[in-house]
Image (tube, coloured by chain):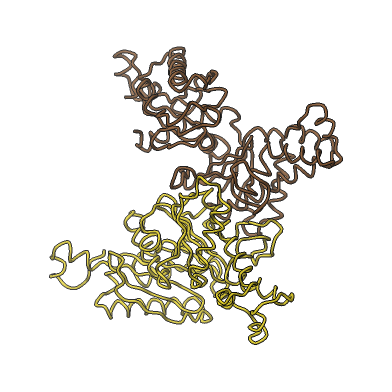
Chain colours: A yellow, B brown
Amino acid sequence: MALRSAGDQTKTKNHEVREMSETFVGIDVGGTNVKIGLFDPNLKLISKTSVTTEAEMGPEIVIDKMVKTVENLLAENGFTLQDIVAVGIGTPGPAKYSEGIIIRSTNMPKFKNVPICRMLNEKLGAPIVFDNDANVACWGEFAVGAGKDVEDMVFFTLGTGIGGGIVCNGELVHGCDENGAELGHMIIHPDGRQCNCGQRGCAEAYASADSTAKRATEAVEGGAESSLKKVFDEKGKITSKDVYEHLAAGDKLAKEITDGTAKALAITCINMLHTTEPKRIVFAGGMIAAGDVLLNRIKDFFDEHIWTIKKEAVEICFATLGEDAGIIGAAALAQHTHQQGKLK
Amino acid sequence: MALRSAGDQTKTKNHEVREMSETFVGIDVGGTNVKIGLFDPNLKLISKTSVTTEAEMGPEIVIDKMVKTVENLLAENGFTLQDIVAVGIGTPGPAKYSEGIIIRSTNMPKFKNVPICRMLNEKLGAPIVFDNDANVACWGEFAVGAGKDVEDMVFFTLGTGIGGGIVCNGELVHGCDENGAELGHMIIHPDGRQCNCGQRGCAEAYASADSTAKRATEAVEGGAESSLKKVFDEKGKITSKDVYEHLAAGDKLAKEITDGTAKALAITCINMLHTTEPKRIVFAGGMIAAGDVLLNRIKDFFDEHIWTIKKEAVEICFATLGEDAGIIGAAALAQHTHQQGKLK
């Protein structure tokens, strides 16, 4: 099935040659762009590309565009559809991952009950492995990134919201309805700040990039003294990037706000240590651009609030794969599913 | 290995007869008593017994006593040591479960670095499967009790503290250092009440039987108006049983205290739903004697605080195995390990 269709000569060559012609495709679907990567059996990136999603065109056209992009990427690198062992794809939830169906999507309103796996499979011919974007990025870091040498990992993405992923005994945790690992919605302040999800006091309501910006904005609007006031007056808004820049410049409010972010994340880390007890906790997403000033404060609050005996059990660090985590993770998950003999 | 040593006739009989002579032993070690049960391959209890632990005599004597009790229980029921497929044992932590060593024990101070699995194996001849008491009880409920028809379960014991267990995809979650599922120590109120573990704001500091009693006591000592004051004046203390009795009698403080307990447990349930997403959450331990008045309030607060889409995913209920959960769970874990071909 995974033989490269390059004539008899290739087919009769030794095992190594055959291995080299097996490829995995990783697709990372976002509201704006679809990223696609072609990987060798060692998950080394052969080539990648990115196209605009154009979700407003509806699922048929978007999926056709994905298929054509995959075909072009293969052709450009001397492969054909027959060389694909499996395709991994990550999209935002909610979806029925095991059934291969996108239920709906905030950023892609025309995607309702779309059988994306069947549609892709019909056109690409290869088995499709489907999971949500956070799980896919988590698996990428676990397979070849910040968690590659551990068996138990927890993953947070700090962006508009807080996404999460859990790897337990070397496998992703999906939960009974495939909606587990929504780690940003752990409640750390009952009756606290309103979260977009409808709950109150979620970690996301304090520590996502958006919530960090929002808490700063509220403080400035409430009259707090801060160099961020000028930003707000000039731009009409404050971003988390602004907050971290003003922290670096010594602003007191920025310190207070970013400490709130770090503390909420530290409490969430402690709670994960008391549940699945990961060896490594990995932070990803736009906000990690803040660097050590964010990571070290998370570690400070973690050390301050956890009991003593588990302190050394866990390592807290940043993700290492950057923007390619989605395509790498999708391909890695396809490969893992293949290795387990579980491709459908 | 699991053949009953009952002469040639038995040995040459058909498969069914051989199956019937396979037994599993479950041992539940507590600070006061050691409970031991003998089970058939369907985990039906053949016979059980209980002896005082006498931990002050030291590990050698305690383990010898366990061995003799197992031997007597077998003999009384027409079995010998050769009939044991495997022995399961649960003890309080911390321990190195995979290495079979009790590191230390609050209730058994002479148990330090005790290689309990090796010691039991040398005398009983059978493989020993070892886990902590909460995990073992959790596994019992999962295998044959309140969670027997699901794949993903979370378990809480409400006693002096709050113990926990997590079953994910049909397997117990141990964590990287075998100290996972300490669910009572999830922080739900950062900088909140001091917990015995050293942290602040743990669920255990609000919702264990002891914390429920303690919060009531503090309120009465602080001058709160309550029918519990008489209990305190007469007995010098208030128990969680007292609090629930006075709740039934309409006491306002008892309502406030028990609502605090139920709410803390509900928040912890919500947090578990957003992590491993269990299908069922099972409460066990002495405090569930309070009955529906406890369970229904947990459900009320759960419904009130969770976002809407996950509300129906989970069932919250009480454990069904009662005091036998430990021996059943230990035997069931031994059987499960046997079925997986992982006995050592």
Looking at the image, can residue B143 be seen? no
Looking at the image, can residue A101 be seen? yes
Question: Most extreme residue toward the bottom, as rendered?
Answer: A234
Q: Residue at x 44, y 15 (%)?
A: B68
Q: Answer with left or right where residue A179 lies relative to residue A317.
A: right
Q: Residue at x 42, y 81 (%)?
A: A51
Question: Most extreme residue toward the front, as rendered?
Answer: A250
In front: A61, or B331?
A: B331
Q: Answer with left or right where residue B150 lies relative to residue B117.
A: right
In front: A156, or B192?
A: B192
**Image location of residue B135, percent across then percent down:** 51, 38
In front: B6, or B244?
A: B244
From what the image shows, is residue A157 above or below residue B274? Answer: below
Q: Quadrant of residue A172?
A: bottom left
Quadrant of the frame with the C terminus of chain B: top left
From what the image shows, is residue B34 above or below residue A105? Answer: above
**Image location of residue A60, percent across then percent down:** 47, 77
Quadrant of the frame with the N terminus of chain B: top left
In front: A258, or B259?
A: A258
**Image location of residue B267, percent across then percent down:** 65, 51
**Image location of residue A131, percent across then percent down:** 46, 63
Q: Residue at x 49, y 31 (%)?
A: B90
